Amino acid sequence: MNIPRATYRVQFHERFRLPDALALVPYLHELGISHVYASPVFAACPHSTHGYDVCNFSRLNPELGSEDDLGKLVQALHKNKMGLVLDIVPNHMGITTPQNIWWWDVLKHGRASRYAGHFDIDWESPDPKSRNKLVLPVLGEKYEQVLAKGGLTITRYGQEPLLHYYENAFPVAPGSMPTNLDINEINASPVVLDELIQRQNYRLEFYGADGLLLNYRRFFAVNTLAGVRVEDKNVFAGVHSLLARWLAKDWLDGLRVDHPDGLRNPGEYLRQLEQLAPGRWIVVEKILMAGENLPASWPVAGTTGYDFLNYVNGLFIDPSGESALDHFYSDFTGETLDYAAQAHEKKLFVLKELFQTEGNRLANLLAVIARDRKLNFETEKLSGALNELMAALPVYRTYLPEEKDQAVMLIEKGLAKAQLRHPEWPSDLFDFLKVVLLTGRPDDVESEFIARFQQLTGPAMAKGVEDTAFYCFNRLVSLNEVGGNPGQFGISTAAFHQFCSEHQNRRPNSMLTTSTHDTKRSEDVRARLNLLSEIPDLWSQAVQRWTAMNAGHKRGDWPDRNAEYLFYQTLVGAWPLTSGRVLACMEKSVREAGQQTTWARNNSQYEAALCNFIAEALRDPEFVRDMERFVAGLTEAGHINSLAQTLIKLTAPGVPDIYQGCELWDFSLVDPDNRRPVDFELRQRLLAEAKKLSAEEIWARHEEGLPKLWMIQKTLDLRSHRKHCFSGQYEPMYARGQKAGQVIAFIRGGGVITVVPRWTLKSNDWGDTLLELPSGLWRNEFTGEDFAGTAKIDKLFKNFPVALLVGKEHVR
């Protein structure tokens, strides 16, 4: 297996194509990258900015270039002894375009389509109007209103009739067109047009209709992404047809599997994938919660690294600031400090609001099972108990029947918690759930229930926690990251070392990340915001000043204090930034939070007040000057935090990944902000300059991001020449002295020592703090200085704020 030394994530779209990546190969090679890590490149819905809405698995996306372009990229990579890792999306497809020939055929032929079994569709809807039809929530108003306004029309594309709703087109079922009327006559009569539409294999519905029951599995709550039944061998073959050809050509060294938790049986899928891609490095986008491990039976190198991200981020949170930040956040906003309760509440909310269809399907299955077992439970009570159990689960999903011991523990604890919340519900209701989930009969109905239950708990966690609670609980938003726990204020060095040691023993080739296309904030935004934990009093004083300065920009009580508090953190974390970027981020944040406005039900007055507040605040010279002075006091310490976490990532057990552009300081916010164009010409120029400069000269230009770029290049160069050290054991090291707790250190393979500082804002005076080195002479890879015996921390960090020591017998 070709294990990457380091990956570099690139986001492909029509403005960054395969030829653009080809031009970057020399630069990435100089930087020390071994593998380009590509976003999905299969044919996606037109103008896709991310590639996760694949509409045709058998074609390369023409907006990115040709297959010849891909071949040229691979050839250039191989010439430089590099490789390609590809992101694949087996769980779902984009369905907004006729280019998805599978979905289009299902719309045209319905249940009789040869592709009907490719999608997870419930043709036996409890609603008679939807039976044997696909329910499509695409209308901006109720169907009757759209029809009356002439919003639906029949046209022809060649000989094929099409039903149009603005830019949306739908096929017309064969034989359903009236033979005695032309198209103009059909469109002129709402009655005739309605009769024709009712004969189709789909129902067009208002996307915001109350109680709308969809009948196809989606990716989370995204109506335009339909779940694919990749567990079917024919579907698996279709989904991976082009991928198989590229693997046969030896174009791919590795794969990243998107959202495995959405699959019916992730373990079985991964075993099939391993057979298709033998010897390839495979990682999965599996979000592990605290104390959770990947199923041991999965034949993968590891995860995409969110577990590492949250551990390394937690190191730079000062726990001494928790109490002060708690009190101020509670007093200023009036919001709860009980994050666990809020997360539970939001999971219940999304299960009822966003996943009503999936929940009803589960409850109906459970009702059938109850009747088969001669039990009498109301479907409403079954639904309530299911929701409470799913909300109580502390992980994204269980993996029955493979990981039964873990599932038993999690489900029993979840049921106990649910029963504690509802002592008025009959205990035999929860006993029944436990029996079905953990000792269910191997029949079709019970197996179907267990599979669908496990497929729904992940979306409930993602939407309820990541996309709702994370936007409500704003105490310190650098903690609100995918796979994280905002209620846990920091990580001890002992816990971090234990995590790395276990990582080394279990999955030493797992990916390590600090920024991705899905992170809520980039690594450098978090690095700066973490500093607030060191200065809670100064922070609260600043917020109070800013609140007073901006009071006149409010409209009544809007925006609310929680949004205002998030606004100030956003500015401090990412400044300087344009008002457009702030507005986009804040609009998304308040809609996701759902406290004042939502995506489906916009509170236009609130959103107008928020936009006005932001615009006026950023035009207020007194506020901007004060805020800039505050940020200036954080800048250097934020850079040091960034270097420290990056060096840990580059040297800890695993494969470090660099998200596009993050080799310099990158202050990106939530998507789509983190997919802005990257200035690669600047990075290439700075890398050429950096190679001629000393550590002191590099640090003197830290405002430009030069230290991060330079440190990455030097560290990856060392990894390329000292592979045995970085594949060797991980051993913690501990400093001594008055500031020992502010030093993180570890040794790899007995020959390379990483030493970084933390909490440098509140104190950068190292006093008597020192680190005992193993015997022998140790060279600082960054400064060229030699150390032996006892190294004083102030000397280690004198010329550059982090240190990488190489034992003299390992020095080149």
Image (cartoon, grey):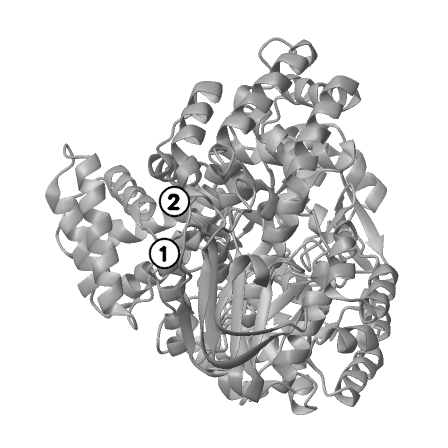
Vertically, is 539 above or below 648? above
Asked which quadrant contains residue 505, the reply is: bottom left
Asked which quadrant contains residue 98, the reply is: bottom right
637 or 449: nearer the eye? 637
Quarter that holds the C terminus: bottom right
Proximity of marks 2 and 1: CB atoms separated by less than 8 Å: yes
296 or 626: nearer the eye? 626
Residue 544 is situated, as x and y percent measured from the top left of the image, at 57, 18
Between marks 2 and 1, how big is the CA–CA gap? Answer: 10 Å
Name the residue that disc number 1 marks: 290
The amino acid beneath tag 1 is Ala
The answer to whether residue 524 shows anywhere in this view is yes
Q: Residue at x 60, y 55 (%)?
A: 225
Residue 164 is situated, as x and y percent measured from the top left of the image, at 76, 45
Name the residue that disc number 2 marks: 488
Q: Residue at x 67, y 28 (%)?
A: 145
Q: Residue at x 74, y 24 (%)?
A: 624
Q: Dot 1 surroundings within 10 Å: few (below 14), some, or many (20 or more)?
A: some
Mark before the other along the chain sequence, 2 or 1: 1
Vertically, is 591 above or below 69? above
417 or 436: nearer the eye? 417
Q: Dot 2 surroundings within 10 Å: few (below 14), some, or many (20 or more)?
A: few
781 on left or right of 266? right
The amino acid beneath tag 2 is Gln
Q: Residue at x 75, y 28 (%)?
A: 149
